[in-house]
Image: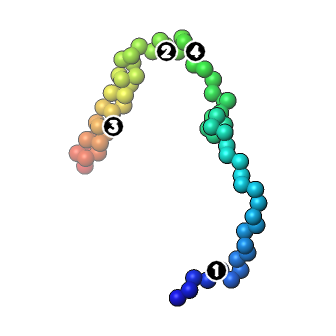
Amino acid sequence: MTTAAHPGARPVPLGPEPAETPECESSTSHEISTPEAPELHNAWPGWAPMLLIAVMVLACVLFMVGRIFSI
């Protein structure tokens, strides 16, 4: 059995190799990020995000338990 090319296929024209993207420009966020202000590092105490996550987890668990035992 031979492997024939697709009947309607045309050969790919040869041309120059594409240039490599420079390392610094390969990111999709190149030159669009803004530096974070130092004040934001201390905007929330360390326990506040954990408390928020704990409240959300507790609410989800209570919802699941309520759905399981509901009639």
Query: For this view, does 21 lie left or right of residue 38?
Result: right
Q: Secondary structure at mark 1?
A: loop
Disc number for residue 36 = none
> Sequence order check: which comes first, mark 2 or mark 3?
2
C-alpha gap between disc 1 and disc 2 = 61 Å
Dot 1, how many residues are within 10 Å of its Cα: few (below 14), some (14-19), or many (20+)?
few
Position in image of residue 37 (x %, y %): 58, 15
C-alpha gap between disc 4 and disc 2 = 8 Å
Residue positioned 71% across, 48% down in the render: 19
Residue positioned 66% across, 39% down in the render: 22
Residue positioned 31% across, 39% down in the render: 63
Q: Which residue is mark 4?
A: 37
Q: Secondary structure at mark 4?
A: loop
Dot 3, how many residues are within 10 Å of its Cα: few (below 14), some (14-19), or many (20+)?
few
C-alpha gap between disc 1 and disc 4 = 59 Å
Position in image of residue 11 (x %, y %): 72, 73
Q: Which residue is mark 3?
A: 60
Q: Secondary structure at mark 2?
A: helix
Q: Secondary structure at mark 3?
A: helix
22 or 36: which is nearer to us? 22
Q: Nearer the viewer, mark 1 or mark 3?
A: 1
Q: Amino acid at mark 3?
A: Cys
Position in image of residue 28 (x %, y %): 63, 39
> Sequence order check: which comes first, mark 1 or mark 2?
1
Q: Which residue is mark 2?
A: 41
Q: Nearer the viewer, mark 3 or mark 4?
A: 4
Q: Which residue is mark 1?
A: 5
Q: Confirm or deny contact between disc 2 and disc 3 (CB under 8 A).
A: no
Q: Nearer the viewer, mark 1 or mark 4?
A: 1
Would you say residue 28 is visible in this rendering? no
> Sequence order check: which comes first, mark 3 or mark 4?
4
Residue positioned 33% across, 27% down in the render: 54
